[in-house]
Amino acid sequence: MHGAHYATADFVSRNNNILGGSFVCPAVSKEEANFLIEKIKNGSLLHIYHPNRSYHKTSRILNNTRFISAISENRVSSQLFNF
């Protein structure tokens, strides 16, 4: 999660209701970023979902058996994200 200039209601309204681009990180307004990051740090899991069948089929995270196993065994490390 990170703060971004494009994660504001004003930006969205000026850009045809499109939030902007963040590769895979949830982007929030810069004003809210520190508060939210402090709330979820130290072991929180942020689950973001959209019922998009194409995403479900092509997601490297959802279809990564190493990642799924590590979560279920509570042994997640940053190395699991390097697919």
Image (cartoon, helix red, strand yellow):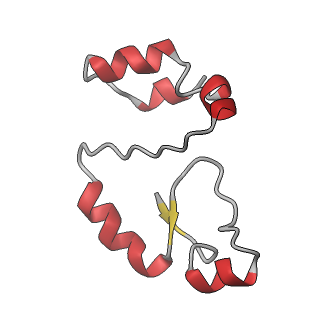
Q: Quadrant of residue 6?
A: bottom right
In the foreground, 10 or 73: 10
In the foreground, 2 or 51: 51
Percent position of residue 46, x then y: 37, 47
**Above-or-below relation of 19 to 14:** above
Percent position of residue 56, x then y: 60, 28
Determine the residue positioned at 61% across, 77% down.
Answer: 5
Q: Quadrant of residue 33?
A: bottom left
Number of labels in the image equals 0
Percent position of residue 48, x then y: 46, 46
Determine the residue positioned at 34% across, 62% down.
Answer: 37
In this image, 9 relative to 45: left or right? right
**Above-or-below relation of 60 to 48:** above
In the foreground, 31 or 16: 16
Percent position of residue 4, x then y: 57, 71
In this image, 51 relative to 23: left or right? left
**Above-or-below relation of 82 to 43:** above
Determine the residue positioned at 23% across, 48% down.
Answer: 42
Quadrant for the C terminus in the image: top right
**Above-or-below relation of 73 to 2:** above
In the foreground, 67 or 79: 67
Determine the residue positioned at 33% across, 66% down.
Answer: 36
